[in-house]
Image (cartoon, helix red, strand yellow):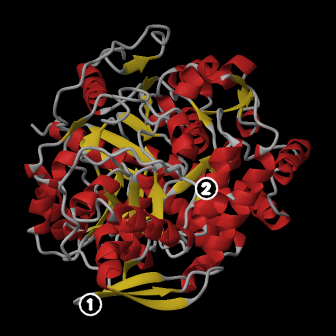
Amino acid sequence: MVIKQRRVSLVSMPWNSATRPSIQVGILRSVAEAAGWRVDSHYAYLDFYAMAPKMIGLAGDDWAQAYEMVSERLYHLSVGDWVFSRRGAAPEERAEYFDLLRSKRVDEATITLIDSLRAVADRHVAATTERLLAAEPEVVGFTSMFSQNGATLAVAERLRESGYAGPIVLGGSNCEGPMGRALLANFPAVDAVVDGPGEEAFAVLLTQVAAGGPLASAGRLVARGDAVVEVAELVPADQLTVPMPNYDGFFEQLSAAGLDRLGAEVSLPVEFSRGCWWGAKTHCTFCGLNGATMRYRSKHPDSVAGELRHMMDRYGVLDFFAVDNILDLGYLDTALPAVEELHSDHSLFFEVKANMEWADIRRMRRSGVRSVQPGVESLSTEGLRALRKGATAFLNVRFLLGCAEYDVRADWNILTGYPGETPASILAQLDLVASLSHLTPPHVTLIRFDRFSPYVEAPGSYGLELTKPFPGYRFAYPELSEADLWNIAYHFEGEFTDDPRNAELRRRLAARIRLWRNRHEGASFTYRLGFACVVLDDRRPGLRQQRVTLNGDQARLFRAVIGGTRFRDLQAQGWDGPRWEATLELLQSWQRRRWVMIEGTKVIALAVRQQPSAYRTPPAKGAPKRARTQIPLTLTSPATRR
């Protein structure tokens, strides 16, 4: 007697990146297969990515840019959700939505593109539904994050209209807390949601289906009819034990969709930790990334190199994207040296905290970490305190210089428009960025008030009043009540008392950053070390173009401030006593020339090595220390104070 293997379909809808498989689908496939289920991994966004160019007449780079426009740049206006949820929108409704887009400076060509994508979405919903029904799954599970709700709900509803009677479950960040309850309450096609990490909840759901009984809430699984109950707070284990993702279905579907040309651009998501060790101590005011649990836990370090080696061998891909909120610093001494021993030309991306030593950056680079997203957020120490970042402007600049020194690309942001921002904090950044044009420029981002962040959880603590969800939600979900819109939304608008001078200063800061980005390609400020000299070559826009050779004590002093140091450590190295006053004057003159940055009693050289190398010895830690000397110095140079 042949026993038919139970079957489950796992689905990820647009607007996931077409060059990156869904890690949620990959992990849950491993969970389901371990439980004896046959899995159809359906990366439906690949079908959409292949279908759209033929229907709307875009191809190649034009379509790639259009897809990124909707999925990334217009995400905050709910464009991706609207395209699917309002496929049959009447002309009047469309006109009202397009007026909103125009008010947010979306151009007419982009609006025309958005309107044309509704027909693609309609065909894609029908095709996806047909494929899922053909697989005859007993369970259909969708992962939904960012702009995937509209497409996910559209297919779930079409499945029900087509007679599918099996359980439909949603998981992902769009289902955490009140958002998942709102989905259950307003969309009858959905039978259950997973509130938070999904591996255990999904295994429970499969067990319930296999037993033939109705779905019932358990742990983080919330079933229809039980949606009013609170999810039991599960204490995570000290170590993360989720399985390695299985991406076989992604590569099969990439080829079936005729998208083999994207193969060279594919980067594989990997996960080595969850939660945030910094947020567990001090929750950054704006961060809403850890709704279900903040407690930090990571995989055993011995497993990291093995996972990367397995994926390189199985898929022939060498580029990896860690979805971790923050790098486990313990990995610097454990997992990453083992990764380095793979002796492969892979690349890794991690999100990191920007207070790392140069030796840590060097260690990351030698293990294949070629790009990072550091939590810089501001180049003002005052602003960083307001954001509860636990960093200073000096530490952030030191990190960016270290990335340039060891050839690690830093993709970073400057946040502005937040409660408590002062003109002084913006002015400090306006002055500092003129010194940094040789480093990778940031993006300037206006603060958003995100669910689960301290701003949204306790707005009164910041003098903030939340006024409404972002306006795009109203158009993506026109049938929802105001209360349900509040529950389903992740981003909110708010009002607070702002210094009237800030608006103009923010415009100036944004303009300065645009100038930085436009001129960065030709900007440089480098040093070369000779036996007894230092050669500086300054080619930063807006500053004096010069090549200077430092000799003798000046060369030794400049060497001493590469990588950053403290005044008391300089004094311990011989620049003390009668020599200190002259040394301090020299450092201040270098600050006026924008060769160094001084903050309080710390100083760092702003030039970077002409030839970056991950194999260069970093500045030594634990420099000799002396008792702290009181030095009357502020962030402002004497020339500025006059």
Left or right of 529: which side holds 169? right
Q: Amino acid at mark 2?
A: Gln
Can see residue 81? no
The image shows residue 408 at horizontal and vertical percentages of: 35, 69
Instruction: Tell which of 377 and 481 is nearer to you.
Output: 377
Q: Amino acid at mark 1?
A: Gly
Residue beneath label 1, please?
530
Numbered label tally? 2
Q: Secondary structure at mark 1?
A: loop
| The quarter of the displayed image where residue 642 is located | bottom right
The image shows residue 505 at horizontal and vertical percentages of: 75, 52
Residue beneath the point at 35% across and 26% down: 293
Instruction: Tell which of 374 and 493 is nearer to you.
Output: 374
Image quarter where the N terminus lies is: top left
Residue beneath label 2, please?
429
Q: CA distance from mark 1 to mark 2?
A: 33 Å
Left or right of 522: which side holds 33? left
| The quarter of the displayed image where residue 209 is located | top left
Number of the label disc, if any, that sits on residue 144: none
Q: Residue furthest front?
A: 578
| The quarter of the displayed image where residue 475 is located | top right
The image shows residue 12 at horizontal and vertical percentages of: 45, 48
Residue beneath the point at 22% across and 44% down: 30
